[in-house]
Amino acid sequence: MTQVSPTFSPLYRQIRGLILQALESGEWRPGQAIPSEQELAARFNVSQGTVRKAIDEMAADNILVRRQGRGTYVASHTDPRQMFRFLRLVPEEGELFAHPKSIPIDCRRAKATQEAACALGIEQGTPILILRRVLQFEGKPVVGDEIFLPEEIYQGLSMEMLQFWNSSLYSLFETRFGLRMIRAQERIRAVAADRAAAELLQVDEGTPLLSVERVTYTYGDKPVEWRRGVYSTAGYYYLNDLT
């Protein structure tokens, strides 16, 4: 019989887990300062250095943000530096573009297909919301998204709300529904524009596009969004920093 050895987690990782539990419970909200390293060390009965190491790792993962002379804050999608951190499309000249404009096309209720249910970790047939929108860069349509959301989490989301929101979609989810997107997993492949994608992005049928499928997770590694997007790379490229 195969013997399973007990796993060992470094103390700072255990402290990271405890801080994440506090974030998940809503003890500290996005944009809010967390207690000082000294206070957390006393709370968890560990050294300040252990707390610092946990916070350093969480800051590297964009869960927390250190602000010089002000303390450590819960990262927020309303922060301009965090607003579009999952959007990897940049212009060919390498300079950051102005914030893209989100143009909602449709928001409707549906029941989760097997594919959507699997991606979102819910039962097939569960009520969901399906959003369609275009992202425009300097007035040019560049990204077309179809976004699937569990209705239970996003109750009250409507086309009117989407039309009047003038910031990123994730900042809307955070502000109105208390959701903080922690990480995302993407699958990317090259496709040719079909008729629908060509009309949406104002390109010719057959134009090479990127197909980007993303599952986004909140605290507790819970999937809360599945999206399928097509990206036009005429004048842009997909940038991913590997560390």
Image (tube, grey):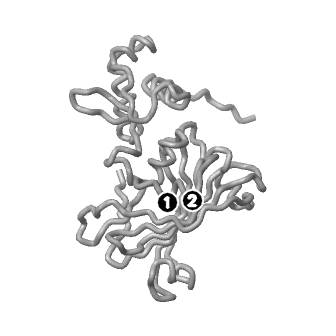
Quick one: SS at disc 1?
Answer: helix
Question: Which quadrant of the figure contains the N terminus?
Answer: top right
Q: What residue type is disc 1 on?
A: Gln
Quick one: SS at disc 2?
Answer: helix
**Disc assigned to residue 163:** 1
Camera-side residue of 158 and 94: 158
Residue 83 percent coordinates (x, y) = 38, 50
Asked whether the beta carbons under mark 1 and mark 2 sit within 8 Å of each other, the answer is yes
240 is higher (above) or lower (below) than 173: below
Give the residue pinned by disc 2. 159
Q: Residue furthest right?
A: 125
Q: Residues within 10 Å of mark 2 (few under 14, many from 20)?
A: some
191 is higher (above) or lower (below) than 101: below
Q: Residue at x 56, y 54 (%)?
A: 215
230 is higher (above) or lower (below) than 49: below
Q: Residue at x 65, y 61 (%)?
A: 108
Q: Residue at x 32, y 48 (%)?
A: 80
